[in-house]
Image (spheres, rainbow, N blue to C red):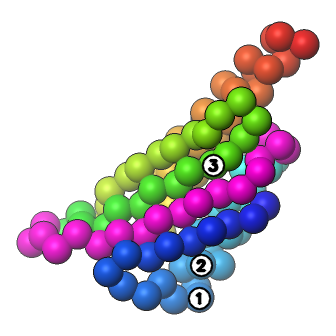
């Protein structure tokens, strides 16, 4: 799957990029018609520990799926986003197979 990654207010290191790609590749096990994924990493300038925002948009036939999570680490955000997208992809696949 093609992944476009943008990091706002910081530079993402290669470990984070590889981790994200690996997690997103696992989504293809649940829905094989994923076209691409846009990933946005943002750091908020707040005093709280949970200042890292991850937003993932996945393009699939019939519309896009988007998830946004805030955590204290980007890896935790990616995990939460992928879990939410996994549930959405399973629902999308069930709807498509019900119409066929």
Which residue position is annotated with label 1? 14
Instruction: Write the residue at 75% across / 65% down.
Output: 2
Q: In the image, is residue 69 part of the stretch drawn in magenta?
A: no
| Residue 30 in view here | no
* Secondary structure of the residue carrying numbered label 3: strand
Residue found farthest to the top: 99
Q: Disc 3 and disc 2: Cα gap in Å?
A: 16 Å
Give residue 58's mark.
3
* Figure quadrant of the N terminus: bottom right
In this rendering, position of residue 32 left or right of residue 53: right
> In the rendered image, which quarter is residue 21 located in?
bottom right
- Label 1 crowd bin: few (<14), some (14–19), many (20+), radius 10 Å: few
> In the rendered image, which quarter is residue 74 located in?
bottom left
Instruction: Write the residue at 52% across / 54% down.
Output: 56
Q: At which x and y percent is residue 59?
A: 67, 46
* Figure quadrant of the C terminus: top right
Instruction: Write the residue at 23% across / 69% down.
Output: 44
Please report contact status of discs 2 and 1: CB closer than 8 Å, yes or no.
yes
| Residue 99 in view here | yes
Q: Earlier in the sequence, mark 3 or mark 1?
A: 1
Please report contact status of discs 3 and 2: CB closer than 8 Å, yes or no.
no
- Label 3 crowd bin: few (<14), some (14–19), many (20+), radius 10 Å: some
* Secondary structure of the residue carrying numbered label 1: helix
Mark toward the viewer: 3 or 2: 3
Which residue position is annotated with label 2? 17
| Magenta residue span | 30-48
């Amino acid at each position: 799957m093609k992944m476009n990654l943008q990091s706002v207010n910081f530079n993402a290191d290669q470990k984070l990029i590889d981790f994200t790609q690996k997690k997103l590749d696992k989504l293809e096990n649940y829905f094989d018609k994923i076209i691409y994924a846009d990933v946005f990493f943002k750091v908020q300038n707040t005093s709280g520990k949970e200042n890292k925002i991850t937003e993932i948009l996945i393009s699939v036939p019939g519309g896009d799926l988007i998830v946004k999570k805030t955590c204290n680490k980007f890896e935790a955000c990616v995990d939460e986003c992928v879990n939410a997208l996994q549930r959405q992809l399973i629902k999308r696949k069930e709807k498509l197979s019900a119409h066929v």
